[in-house]
């Protein structure tokens, strides 16, 4: 009987081990030059911003021991990047999956942009890494919210009205905001969006359906908010003030008082960031744009990017891609004529890890 019990325990243990997510804390990323002024340094800064947005304390140090590079290869040691254990373990499981791809096995690396798309650009991966609460109701257990709220009826983002509720705490990092997206006429709640200040001074974002469950993107019928990565693009590192004048609504904070509160929260956040962030790459807060250019250069690659990524001459590539349409980027025209990553991956010389079809907007593919 004892032998049987021991045998049973061994079998169960092996089963649990086999079912546990496999992890790899080391991964190589490849920078592929995309435009004339593109440099490795710009993309290193962009990557550091990406890691910081994911909760890393990389901004807190002038030296980043978990990030090294040689020529166009950037090596990450996830355990040394200043993530908490939960984030570190989940990133290691994503790293393992990326390293199983044909692309990685062929090049001993993946495109830097694919790593960004697979982490910051994939809402459910992002939620796991930064630990966004699974249910909206969890916020009311984590924070004490002020009873009085702000009302927005002239939003620059939402197509409907918004009610903003924020936590009330004297602690610098104990701050959260909940936006109730409501029908302007019926006042019915349509969905929710959240913001929280992370321990590294960055902001994390969540989007919830009417039942308070996490969802991958905001409904474009109600708002232009898109996915969490678009929230980052809009807010940058700030608690944004109100850009438009609002009507004062009975039962809610007067417009001017509400805007003053938002500006006060933003000033408090900036003091925290300035006290924490020692890394010059993140001390200049405008440099977050380099992260966006880096992932855009991957999602909308130029001929030069693809030539470097695939190791094929531009002349051969032009023949291969002659049936695909190109476009110019509305914000960064200097990127040149660009292709669509969703079309490009179908004809890549190797099988790639699936990524979202869009990083910022609602999309049909969301691994």
Image (cartoon, rainbow, N blue to C red):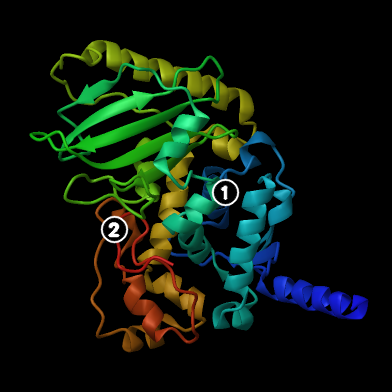
Give the image quarter of residue 93: bottom right
Residue 258 vertical position relative to residue 221 in the rendered view, above or below: above
In three-dimensional space, the C-alpha distance between marks 2 and 1, rounded to whole angstroms, equals: 23 Å
Secondary element at tag 1:
helix
Residue, disc 2: 362
Q: Secondary structure at mark 2?
A: loop
Q: Which residue is mark 1?
A: 51
Q: Tell me what residue is drawn at x 70 percent, y 66 percent.
A: 24
Q: Is residue 168 left or right of residue 209?
A: right
Residue 100: x and y in percent read: 61, 78
- What percent of the width, then of the height, locates residue 79? 73, 53
Q: Are marks 2 and 1 in contact (CB under 8 Å)?
A: no
Tell me where residue 243 appears, x and y as whole percent: 23, 26
User: Outermost residue toward the front?
Assistant: 1
* Quadrant housing residue 323: bottom left
Q: Is residue 140 above or below residue 214?
A: above
Q: Is residue 192 left or right of residue 167?
A: left
Q: Nearer the viewer, residue 102 or 97?
A: 97
Location of the N terminus (image quadrant): bottom right
Query: Local crowd at mark 1 within 10 Å, few (<14), some, or many (≥20)?
Result: many
- Asked if residue 334 can be seen in this view, the reply is yes
């Amino acid at each position: 009987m004892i032998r049987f019990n021991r045998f049973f325990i061994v079998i169960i243990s092996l089963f649990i081990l086999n079912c546990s997510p496999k992890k790899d804390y080391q991964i190589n990323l490849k920078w592929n030059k995309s435009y004339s002024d593109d440099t490795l340094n710009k993309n290193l800064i962009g990557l550091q911003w990406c890691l910081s947005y994911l909760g890393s304390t990389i901004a807190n140090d002038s030296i980043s021991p978990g990030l090294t590079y040689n020529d166009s290869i950037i090596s990450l040691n996830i355990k040394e990047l200043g993530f908490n254990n939960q984030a570190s373990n989940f990133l290691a499981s994503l790293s393992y999956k990326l390293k199983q791809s044909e692309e990685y096995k062929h090049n001993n690396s993946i495109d830097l942009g694919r790593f960004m798309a697979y982490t910051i650009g994939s809402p459910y991966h992002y939620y796991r890494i930064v630990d966004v609460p699974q249910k909206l109701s969890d916020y009311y257990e984590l924070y004490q919210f002020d009873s009085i709220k702000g009302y927005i009826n002239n939003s620059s983002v939402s197509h409907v009205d918004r009610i903003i509720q924020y936590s009330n705490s004297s602690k610098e990092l104990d701050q959260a905001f909940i936006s109730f997206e409501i029908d302007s006429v019926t006042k019915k709640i349509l969905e929710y969006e959240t913001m929280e200040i992370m321990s590294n001074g960055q902001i994390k974002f969540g989007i919830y359906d009417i039942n308070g469950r996490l969802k991958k993107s905001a409904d474009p019928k109600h708002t232009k908010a898109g996915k969490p990565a678009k929230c980052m693009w809009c807010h940058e590192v700030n608690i944004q003030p109100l850009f438009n004048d609002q009507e004062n609504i009975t039962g809610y904070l007067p417009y001017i008082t509400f805007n003053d509160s938002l500006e006060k929260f933003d000033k408090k956040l900036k003091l925290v960031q300035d006290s924490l962030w020692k890394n010059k790459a993140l001390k200049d807060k405008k440099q977050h744009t380099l992260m966006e250019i880096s992932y855009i250069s991957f999602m909308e690659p130029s001929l030069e990017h693809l030539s470097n990524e695939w190791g094929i001459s531009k002349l051969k590539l032009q023949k291969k891609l002659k049936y695909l349409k190109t476009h110019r980027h509305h914000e960064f025209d200097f990127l040149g004529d660009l292709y669509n990553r969703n079309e490009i991956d179908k004809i890549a010389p190797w099988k790639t890890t699936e990524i979202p079809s869009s990083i910022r907007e609602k999309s049909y593919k969301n691994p």
